[in-house]
Image (cartoon, helix red, strand yellow):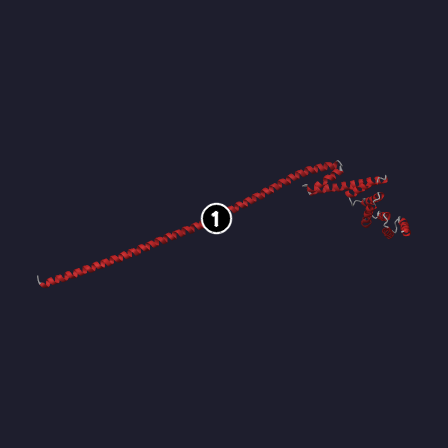
Amino acid sequence: MHEYDLEEIKREIVEGRSLTIKSNNLINALSADLKSIAKRQQGYERRIFMHSIAAYLVTIIIILGLTKIAMDAQIEAVRSETRDSSEELEELQVELELVRKREQGRIEASQEAARLHQILRAENRRDFLTELPKVAIMALSPTERAVFEEAGSKARRELSRLSYQTGIEHARAGRYHEASQAFRESLKLESDAPHSAQARFELALSYRALDQQKSAIFILIKLTEASASVDVLDEATLLLAECQTDIKLYNDAKETLRTFLRRFPASPLRGEARLKLSRLNLQH
């Protein structure tokens, strides 16, 4: 073997070693790159995993929140419906109780109306008038109420007339105290009856007979100022002057007599009034 061949072989061996070293270096570098890439990949996968977990948790929270909102809305709707049902039930119960009370009131009113009718048929007018105020609080129909009120008006008018007649009888017998009580009762029962003006005049006469001229004057002043009965006006005015004279109100009596002469020029009592006025002018 020639020296040249040995040199060539040595050179090839050196180059082979050099290539081996370079290959090892490249392999080591490639291995390092692969390890670096693997680490980066693991970090990336770890980040993706954590992001996935975070996204999952956020999604779960959102779903739970929306579910809670929906459930709260449904629960509130059910509660509202329950409240409405409860209120409606309470209203129905109240209405039912009112209906029961009205029905009970109607039954009681019918019984009371029947009793009042029996009293009325028995002509117990005073008892009927005593019980009549109950009509105002009874559950009667307008027609029934009107019938009882009309019956009450008739009973008051009749009792007022009877009391007036009783007062006249007492006055004629000289029982002026009893007469005044009867006349007051007559006016209390019905103050605007056809005989009311005459009852006031007779009451004033009774008061004068009982030496209660002030009470008589009070009645006579109102009677002469506002009486609807013309027949009693002249007599009431003359009696007023007499009562004023009795308690020495001479100037008032004179003025009353002058008023009498002006107001009642055709009265049959005109002569008596003129005579009384002349006496008062002479004496006082």
Measured from the top left, where is residue 19 in percent x and y? 18, 60
45 with respect to 124 (left or right): left
Badge 1 amino acid: Asp
10 with respect to 54 (left or right): left
The residue lying toward the viewer, choosing from 117 and 171, is: 171
Instruction: Examine the rendered structure and indicate whether residue 120 appears above or below residue 29.
Output: above
Residue drawn 36% across the image and 53% down it? 50
Residue drawn 22% across the image and 59% down it? 25
197 with respect to 44 (left or right): right
**SS for tag 1?**
helix
Residue drawn 60% across the image and 42% down it? 94
Residue drawn 17% across the image and 60% down it? 17
Q: Label 1, on which residue?
A: 72
Measured from the top left, where is residue 238 in percent x and y? 86, 48
Measured from the top left, where is residue 126 in percent x and y? 76, 38
Q: How many numbered circles does the render carry?
A: 1
Quadrant position of the N terminus in the picture: bottom left
Within 10 Å of disc 1 (Cα), the crowding (few <14, some 14-19, many 20+) is few
Q: Is residue 17 visible?
A: yes
State the image quarter where residue 113 is shown: top right
The residue lying toward the viewer, choosing from 225 and 279, is: 279
